Image (cartoon, rainbow, N blue to C red):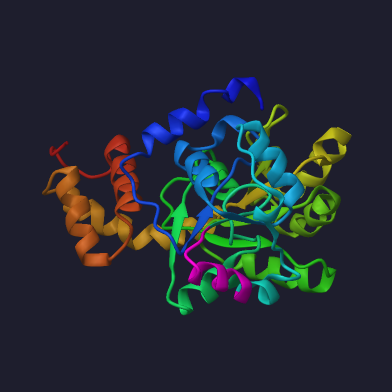
Amino acid sequence: MNLSYANALSTASQACSSQDFPNGCLFVVATPIGNLADITLRAIHTLSLCDYLACEDTRESKNLLNSYGIDKPHGAWIALHQHNEAELSPQIITKLEQGARIAFLCDAGTPSISDPGAWLVHCVQTAGFKVVPIPGVSSVTTLLSVSGLMGQSGFHFLGFLSTKATERDRQIKSIEQTHVPTVLLEAPHRIEALAQSLSCLGHRHVTVGRELTKQYEQIITLPADQLSTWLGADRNRTRGEFALIVHVSPQGAQSDTAPYVEILKVLLSELSLKGSVKLAQLLTGASKNELYNLALNLTKDGDTGSSHRN
């Protein structure tokens, strides 16, 4: 056991004592993406409670649980990955029929997002059994939270692009036409090829997260056509797992929000900021956060002709 987490099990048990963990249930458990301290108390309690642990890689998961002082017998471990997920899902359902609690976890992060698990969840739900998410870390939301994206209504998640250059280039062409940020994932041995492919996006910004939550974490935003140069400047920059966000082009963002700006200008001349945003949302159906950011920028710029402020 990692001595830093010696009290984690008892603390987790106390924190979850009033919660229900039903039998015959599949628990989809998010685990840290690098920093052991990012585990949740609920995840620790769930992993200690479950009868079986279905894992993408049992070796990785055993090391993780050992860090928190959780010991499981040999028969509790089930190796379930992308190559055998369809084959083993019926076996998982049989164990659920017998009343077992089963946890599913991938090597790191939230399962079923560019990792195995989606087919298993589908099969379990179709069979009529409950699936409970135990939320936690995801590289996608981790990077989005520090990307500084403003006024965007959602994002497009693509995950890992094709390993075939022709198909990857086609996917990037589709990103070029997308007017919301696009989130990608990439492995270290393919990051340079991806950077070369992304260079066709020119000055369009890309936020790169490398080794997120780990000791050598790096987060940087730079033009797409400079990504290859940045990687080549230090060989260490190609190491570790990557999450990337391709920002919208400035031109695309302006054209997308222009109608909202004109509506907000009229409303802000008569109403408070909050009132203008609320009415603009009803009129346009656009994101409240996007409209609020636009309205806030307009009031800061003094581009409303209004004495109303909130």
Residue 106 x, y percent position in the rendering: 65, 53
Front position in the image: 176 or 39: 39
**Farthest bottom residue in view:** 126
Q: Quadrant of the C terminus?
A: top left
Residue 245 x, y percent position in the rendering: 61, 50
The question of residue 54 being in magenta is answered with no
Residue extent of the magenta highlight: 90-101
The question of residue 92 being in magenta is answered with yes
Left or right of residue 84, residue 221 in this image: left
Question: Is residue 92 in view from this perspective?
Answer: yes
Left or right of residue 178, residue 196 in this image: right
Front position in the image: 41 or 52: 52
Residue 100 x, y percent position in the rendering: 51, 61
Q: Quadrant of residue 12?
A: top left
Q: Residue at x 82, y 40 (%)?
A: 239
How many tags in the picture? 0
Q: Quadrant of the N terminus?
A: top right
Instruction: Name the main secondary structure of what is drawn in magenta.
Output: helix
